[in-house]
């Protein structure tokens, strides 16, 4: 797949850990929400993107719904 920023095909996929912070007040003992996506990184310009797995996307939606936030409130 070509890079969306520079068009290069010089991309690689790497695993990552992403800590999501939801809008609003966070309790002090709330470490956030960890996701483990595969990153697509362009080795020419550094552009990076990822897509959440369906299971992780469902968890994000569930947390947002529980906090009274809609998906576009973030
Ligand atoms: Zn690029």
Image: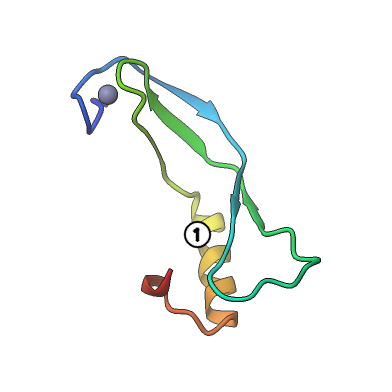
Residue in the image at 51% along x and 70% along y: 61
Q: Nearer the viewer, residue 4 or 26?
A: 26
Q: Is mark 1 within 8 Å of ligand 1?
A: no
Residue in the image at 60% along x and 43% along y: 36
Q: Which residue occupies the extreme bottom position in the image?
A: 68
Q: Which quarter of the image is occupied by the N terminus?
A: top left
Label 1 neighbour load within 10 Å: few <14, some 14-19, many 20+: few
Residue in the image at 43% along x and 78% along y: 70
Q: Residue 15's x, y, as percent?
A: 57, 31
> Viewed as shown, does residue 25 lie left or right of 7?
right
Q: Residue 4's x, y, as percent?
A: 22, 33
Q: Residue 49's x, y, as percent?
A: 38, 38
Q: Is residue 44 above or below residue 23?
A: above
Ligand 1 positioned in quadrant? top left
What is the secondary structure assignment of the residue under circle 1?
helix
Q: Is residue 60 above or below residue 8?
A: below
Q: Is residue 53 above or below residue 3?
A: below
Q: Nearer the viewer, residue 1 or 23?
A: 23
Residue in the image at 75% along x and 65% along y: 30
Q: Which residue occupies the extreme right position in the image?
A: 29
Identify residue for label 1: 57
> Viewed as shown, does residue 54 lie left or right of 32?
left
Q: Nearer the viewer, residue 17 or 51?
A: 17
> Viewed as shown, does residue 32 lie left or right of 48?
right
Q: How is the image coloured?
A: rainbow
Q: Which quarter of the image is occupied by the C terminus?
A: bottom left
- Residue 55 sits in quarter: bottom right
Count of residue discs: 1
Q: Residue 25's x, y, as percent?
A: 63, 75
Q: Nearer the viewer, residue 43 or 24?
A: 24
């Amino acid at each position: 797949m070509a890079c969306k920023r520079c068009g290069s095909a010089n991309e690689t996929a790497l695993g990552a850990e992403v800590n999501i912070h939801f809008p609003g007040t966070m309790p002090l003992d709330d470490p956030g929400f960890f996701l483990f996506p595969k990153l697509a990184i362009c080795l020419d310009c550094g552009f990076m993107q990822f897509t959440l797995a369906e299971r992780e996307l469902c968890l994000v939606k569930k947390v947002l719904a529980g906090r009274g936030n809609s998906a576009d409130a973030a």
